[in-house]
Amino acid sequence: MTSKQIIEQSRILYFSGQIGAAIRLLEEHGRNDTDILYQRIRLLISNVFLNNQDVSGILPLIGDALKETSDKQQDDFRDQLGLALYYLQITKDQPDFSESTQLFTQVMDNREDRSDQAGLVDSCFHLGLVHQYSGERKSAIEYFNSSALLASRLGLELESVNWHAKLTHFGG
């Protein structure tokens, strides 16, 4: 199977409720493939969130990925690092989102400079998460709406934007 086929198969497994099988598939096939590694990290972080697990075990994997990737790929992995750091904070009584906000903002600026519109969908969405948990509902909605609008314009699937923003955060 090609990398693209492996990633698509992992998405099918993930959306059919088999996240463990999706992660195992990626682990088996992605030792030297940064696209597969990126998908694996995304699913590991999703698994952490969905199952209320500790995200700290994923941080070394992201750190290793950052050492071996190009600038654009580094932004993708930095974005995931920001998300992991965000998840570390949301369970705290006094969360500090400064690190994740800094990473998300830096990545968003880089993506804007490169006109990486698909990457900006994630950047806006992740900044929306930070603003939502910081109690800044208006800003959160603006970021979520920007993410959804941009994804729609690009013809991208909106599963995470719609699922998370509407169901989890705003009761839609």
Image: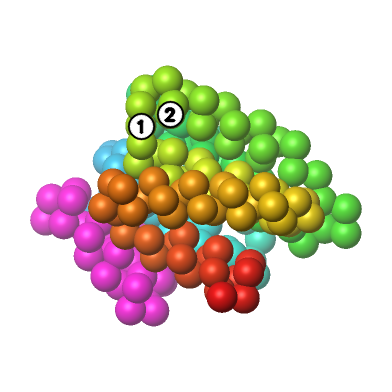
Q: Residue at x 11, y 56 (%)?
A: 1
Q: Residue furthest right?
A: 94
Work out whether 109 lies above or below 136. Answer: above
What's the amino acid at mark 2? Arg
- Quadrant containing the C terminus is bottom right
Q: Residue at x 78, y 55 (%)?
A: 135
SS assignment at label 2: helix
Which residue corresponds to mark 1?
A: 116
Q: Earlier in the sequence, mark 1 or mark 2?
A: 2
Work out whether 130 lies above or below 120. Answer: below
Q: Residue at x 29, y 64 (%)?
A: 10
The answer to which of 163 and 98 lies nearer the viewer is 163
User: Would you say 149 lies left or right of 83 here?
Assistant: left
Residue 103, percent from left and from top: 61, 33
Mark 2: few/some/many CA within 10 Å (<14, 14-19, 20+):
many
The answer to whether residue 60 is visible is: no
User: Would you say 51 lies left or right of 138 here?
Assistant: left
The answer to which of 72 and 57 lies nearer the viewer is 72
Which residue corresponds to mark 2?
A: 111
Tell me which corner region of the image, top left, top right, bottom left or bottom right, holds residue 115: top left
Residue 72, percent from left and from top: 37, 27
Residue 47, percent from left and from top: 51, 66
Number of marks present in the image shown: 2
Residue 96's disc is none
Residue 20, percent from left and from top: 41, 71
Q: Residue at x 43, y 28 (%)?
A: 111
Question: Is residue 15 inside the magenta stretch?
Answer: yes
The answer to whether residue 139 is visible is: yes
Residue stretch in magenta: 1-28
